[in-house]
Image: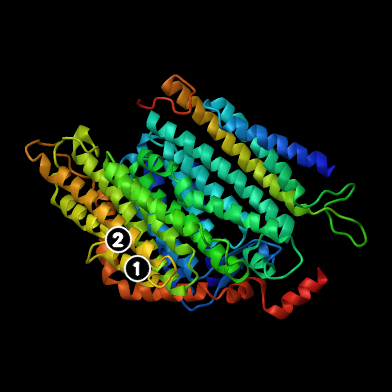
Amino acid sequence: MEALLAIAVGVLSACGVFLILRARTFPVLLGLTLLSYAVNLFLFASGRLRFDAAPLIRAGASYTDPLPQALVLTAIVIGFGMTAYLAMLALRALSEAGTDHVDAGREP
Amino acid sequence: MSTHAPILPILIAFAAALLQMVCDRLSFQRFVGLLSAALLVLVGIWLTWLADDGQTRVYALGDWPAPFGIVLVVDRLAAAMVLLAAVLGFAALLYASAGFDQRGKHFHPLFQLQLMGLLGAFLTGDLFNLFVFFEVMLLASYTLLAHGGGLARTRAGISYVVLNLVGSALFLIALGLLYGTLGTLNLADVAQRLPLPGYDRALTRLALALLIAVFVLKAGLLPLSFWLPQTYTAAGVPVAALFAIMTKVGIVAILRLQVIALAPAMPDLLDHWLTPLALATVVFAALGTLAAARLRALAAWLVLLSAGTLLVTLAQTSAAVTAATLFYLVHSTLAGAAFFLLAGVIAEQRGPAADFLVAGPQPQATWVRISFLVLATTLAGLPPFSGFLGKLMLLTTLREVAAGTAVWVVLLGAGFVVMIALAHNGGYLFWKHRTLVGPAAAIAWPRATATLALVAAGPLLAVLARPLSDYTERTARQLHAPGAYVAAVLGPAPARIAREAIR
């Protein structure tokens, strides 16, 4: 399970970084989304992976750490808002400059 | 009442933003915004006065004790930064109320939210909460940056947003690593656990280094500073003035982390790389001032220069250097913001030539000329104003450190280059084209007042240098006793040990 999660985080961040370095806004946006998926999985794993354990502390029972789950929820909400705003900004740049290049309209 | 004082700044800004979202009539929004900013200044003064008794006030949100809940911590540094942000916010908002806020929608609520993020970032004692306030501040700054429209702003906005989103991802990775290794995100708790055995030191070091990398991205350290001049130049005038304090958020965060958590446990994390890179930033920014093609670009490079100067000092762990750093921080924030506002006023008086350094009519108003002279003297670090005193304090305290000679050479050289740039541009703007007649536009009083207030900060800080430097000295001494901070947040040592045993 750990190996699977580690590979998923690695592949997601590698793809994310590759896409962020592209010169068009849409791939950059996708890259940021992939990177934020990787980060969320990573944050989730920071509380250690446990099977069949509730995020509640009870006497004698095994439990999973609830805090990283709360952190991930916060990070998802914030990341979603940011990505939505970037999408709007990219659309506005497209309509103003007529191209989706990240350096659109730069004087030569 | 004073038990709830630490949360007041955040609540005032948030309540104002909510009120402004309910009713979007411009006069109402202006009134609420300026009222909130004035209240914030008053609360900032009150907090600074309260914090000056040397106590560290801790406000546990929802009464959950640290490290289980989120705490706000008011010490001298946090209180002073709240006051600084509030003063800057008031001046920028006053300037914006003379018409800039009509150029797009929702300027006022966003401005209040940006203030709330700034104040929260200064006040919080929890690293994840710091991330949240950073994001509040950034999200508002993304939209404020685009306020007014235009392709230049949109383009600057895209690179700014993408870069900061990557920064946020790194921030989260650092927090995940820190929680995975130390099991806590409360700054005092982190400081308490770092010297103890029983965790993966290499991973924790990596986490803290990543955290500092994110903070220097916000502060504009050299390999990560190319976004700054472009972004600040493209932003609207009052927005750029408010942004002048955003680089300082990163610097204050590094200062806190370094003094409270790193200095006792990992004192070598900032060695060898921060000072050289910061000096390189200063050189880069000084060259940028010479190359600036418009006044606002010059102001942006000066903001970067002051950030670089402040970063030079962060690797030093002496209270005297920190005191000088804080004095310089206050001075450079106010002077940097004043230069943006003055550039806006000058642009207004030059008609189509705006603030570009091209042939155009010279600004007519006498106070604008005098303001430029005062501000240029302040920014170049010439006597008798606050820039000179700030630089003098920095240089005297930095004489003893290892890289002292290099720091002296670079800071004095940069000051000389800035003086040339300012003198050249001032001469060009005010003397070169005397024959061209500009539009006889009267400057709206809010703009004039806001600009004059910030320009006057230079002479005022020089007059009040003694009380202010005494205050920064007390602040630095309080900051360099991290044991008191930890004890204030987590409770006295016996109670802590008992709690650890239960864990």
Q: What residue type is labelled 2?
A: Leu
The correct choice, above or below, for B472 with respect to A66 in the image is below
**Proximity of marks 2 and 1: CB atoms separated by less than 8 Å:** yes
User: Is B345 or B210 nearer to us in this picture?
Assistant: B210
Mark 2 = which residue? Answer: B412
Q: Which amino acid does label 1 sit on?
A: Leu
Residue B430 screen position, x and y as percent: 14, 45
Q: Residue at x 47, y 26 (%)?
A: A92
Tell me the number on the disc at residue B395. Answer: 1
Is residue B241 at all visible to an observer of this figure? no
The correct choice, above or below, for A10 with respect to B264 in the image is above
Q: In this view, does B418 lie to the left or right of B230?
A: left
Quadrant holding the C terminus of chain A = top left
**Label 1 SS:** helix
Q: In this view, does B119 lie to the left or right of B295?
A: right
User: Is A53 or B42 nearer to us in this picture?
Assistant: A53
Q: How crowded is mark 1: few (under 14 residues within 10 Å), some or many (20 or more)?
A: some
